[in-house]
Amino acid sequence: MIREITLGQYYPVDSVLHRMDPRTKLFGTMIFIVSLFLADSLKAYGVATIFLVLVIRLSKVPVSFMVRGLRAILFLLLLSVSFNLFLTPGTEIFRIGFLKLTWEGLRLAGFMALRLIYLVIGSSVMTLTTTPNELTDGLEKSMGFLNRVGVPVHEISMMMSIALRFIPILVEETDKIMKAQMARGADFESGNLIQKAKSMVPLLVPLFISAFRRATDLAMAMEARCYHGGEGRTKMKPLHYERRDHMGYLVYLVYLAAIVGIGIMG
């Protein structure tokens, strides 16, 4: 289960998306997220599905690798679908006690499930095709205008990049600790919800200690190298747009226009 988390991992392969500027991919991810909240019909979700499938094909990342990450949010997905399915008022299909299934709830639950699934997969495409260093540079460049109002853009970008980089490391660490505790007789599967929560204590304590140790080591290493903010620092690989990035922006805008157009036309 822990190994199924793919957010923050980088999948090294030569593809069009891997070669694109990180700013283009960040913009595309934001457009895709906004479009999912604007979509409110089968036609709109059909366009979003086609767009996502094309992006995955261009990334050359195996579909099974991306879908594997959905298992980590399975509980959240089922919880959201259940609430919308049985607690949405409308035309009743059937009733079980105080819970009733409605056509409106069925429609809303389906759209909610698609939205969550597409959000996870769409965000994973960006992190799987972008290295942490590229992501930091892309965030810093994209939010550079906020420097004028005193926002520490470089520090925020660095923190977000380090947080994403730590996700796969902590996932691997959690898996090791869990296997070590199970070898000592710990049981993480059986029992009720309270017992399962108590059984997680031997897992969380060494995990937090390991995380703080890694964070301290990283801070000391950066300080030993006289690291300071982004002002005046040069880049080993400066970002610059190419023809494929301009084409990417055009495709994103056409896609967003299609979603908005479908919403207006009903």
Image (spheres, helix red, strand yellow):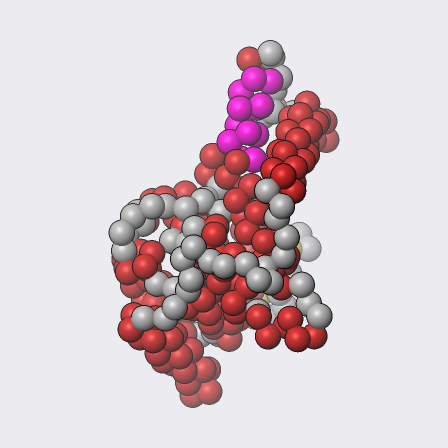
Q: Is residue 38 left or right of residue 156?
A: left
Secondary structure mainly formed by the magenta segment: helix
Q: Is residue 6 left or right of residue 79?
A: left
Point 46% across, 58% down: residue: 235
Query: In this view of the protein, which residue sits in the foreground, 263 or 200?
Result: 200
* Residue 251 appears in the rendering: no
Query: In this view of the protein, which residue sits in the foreground, 91 or 118?
Result: 118
* Residue 5 appears in the rendering: yes
Query: In this view of the protein, which residue sits in the foreground, 52 or 142?
Result: 142
Q: Which residues are magenta?
A: 170-181
Q: Residue furthest bottom?
A: 265
From what the image shows, is residue 176 above or below residue 108?
A: above
- Quarter of the picture containing the C terminus is bottom left
**Image x and y of residue 53, in percent:** 31, 61
Is-magenta flag for residue 263? no
**Image x and y of residue 178, in percent:** 57, 24
Point 34% across, 67% down: residue: 51
**Image x and y of residue 93, in percent:** 53, 63
Q: Is residue 184 left or right of residue 128?
A: right
Is-magenta flag for residue 177? yes
Question: In this figure, what is the number of numbered marks?
Answer: 0
From what the image shows, is residue 38 above or below residue 226?
A: below
Point 53% across, 20% down: residue: 179
Query: In this view of the protein, which residue sits in the foreground, 99 or 191?
Result: 191
